[in-house]
Amino acid sequence: MNLLKDKRILIGITGGIAAYKVPEIIRRLQKKGAFVTVVLTNSGAKFVSTLTLSVLTNNRIYTGLFTGELPHIEQGRETDIIVVIPATYDFIGKISSGVADDLLSTLIPAADKKTIFFPSMNVRMFKNRILQSNIATLKKCGYTVIYPEEGELACGDVGLGRLPDYETTVAIIERELGDGYFEGKKVVVSVGGTEENIDPVRVISNRSSGRMGVEIGKAFWLRGAEVTLVVGRTNINIPDYLNIRVAKTVGRMYEILKKEIKSADILIMSAAVSDFIPLSPHKTKIKLRGEVTIKMKRGTDILKSLSKNKGNKIFVGFALEDRDLVKNGRKKLRGKGCDIIVANSINSIDSNSISGYIINKKGEEPFNLLKEEFAWKLTESVEQLIT
Ligand SMILES: Cc1cc2nc3c(=O)[nH]c(=O)nc-3n(C[C@H](O)[C@H](O)[C@H](O)COP(=O)(O)O)c2cc1C
């Protein structure tokens, strides 16, 4: 699901050095189908040119309040969301104290639309108590304020003050346009394959890419959840906005999940956890002299073990099957004590798409979708269990 498609976004640019990043953010929003309008403060115009912005948006750039029209009313009326990026110390002070002395600061109270502020400034300015009190006022009044990240700042200082990276910034805007259904819920997703040592050099693993788990994490996050991924072996890029715990082996994954699940509401076990693990890994590299026999033992059945203390949490398991998907899936639904089993066919592994059945106590539903689409569908299946 693309929550940015056909959405009208008003970007307010104020006079911070991070304004140079905004053209790239606009481009990314447009690529996802959003229509962008820009309002610049006078100081904002010193950092990024109206020419660049008007070419990029194919639109007039609004700066002045006294133009003979009513831009502060019209532009606000036409938009789905207002995003102030970067939001300066000065501008946050203005809005929080009700000053409306230029187009952007007049438009925001007149529009009464969902508004996100992305503060960005020197670390001491950010920690200043007046700013912190102004941010608290904005939040109290229902505005969203996104805390800056820590790192090297344009002024040479190191600390809080940077904008989030491009991908995260766009995702935050997208999330604000969503329904926030899972707000206040914590979702834990296991991701990728596990790997077990045969010796210090070789491992036994599987072909799971981790794509499904990452997409599930993104979809629940976009619908408002706090998401933690417990990640085994994966080569998929994980966005900054998802929390990550690394767990390469079955044992480690079980340990971490046991801890994470305590504060979670929903568990999605999408990782391909090794069913067999070497009985006793060699301490030194195995010398190849003819045939080698590796004795294996059964790895922990994580889902079954965790479901003993499930309570009223929602558990979703994945079952990769090469035949009898519904029959085997149903058996696992009962045997592992979960609420949903996603029985998926063997060609879903290491692929962009997934096919199979969503099985719950009431019945089953077939699907054949891109993993990104399926992740969204899974959020809806979980929603149906809650409501
Ligand atoms: C080179 C330069 C860089 C600046 N960078 C920032 C910044 O990153 N964040 C900030 O809050 N203010 C910054 N300022 C100060 C603002 O531009 C100044 O407070 C201005 O009045 C803000 O106007 P506006 O809020 O109407 O856009 C900077 C000023 C200069 C000269």
Image (cartoon, rainbow, N blue to C red):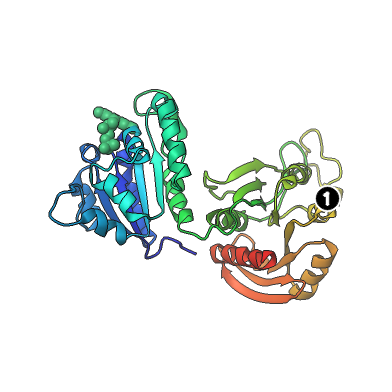
Q: Disc 1 designates what residue?
A: 300
Residue at the spot x=21%, y=48% of the render? 52
Ligand 1: which quarter? Answer: top left
- Density class for disc 1 (Cα within 10 Å; few <14, some 14-19, many ≥20) is some
What's the amino acid at mark 1? Thr
Out of 262 and 116, give the one closest to the viewer: 116
Would you say residue 15 is visible in this rendering? no
Q: Residue 7 location in percent, x, y?
A: 37, 62
- The front one of 137 and 272 is 137
Nearer the observer, 354 or 161? 161
Q: Is mark 1 within 8 Å of ligand 1?
A: no
Above-or-below relation of 208 to 6: above
Residue 39 in the image: state x and y as whole percent. 25, 49
Residue 333 screen position, x and y as percent = 79, 66
Residue 181 in view: yes
Residue 321 rendering spot, x and y as whole percentages: 74, 68
Q: Secondary structure at mark 1?
A: loop
Closer to the camera, 69 or 227? Answer: 69
Which residue is rendered at x = 54% and y = 57% of the image?
A: 180
Q: Is 117 displayed left or right of 36 in the figure?
A: right
- Which picture quadrant has residue 130? top left
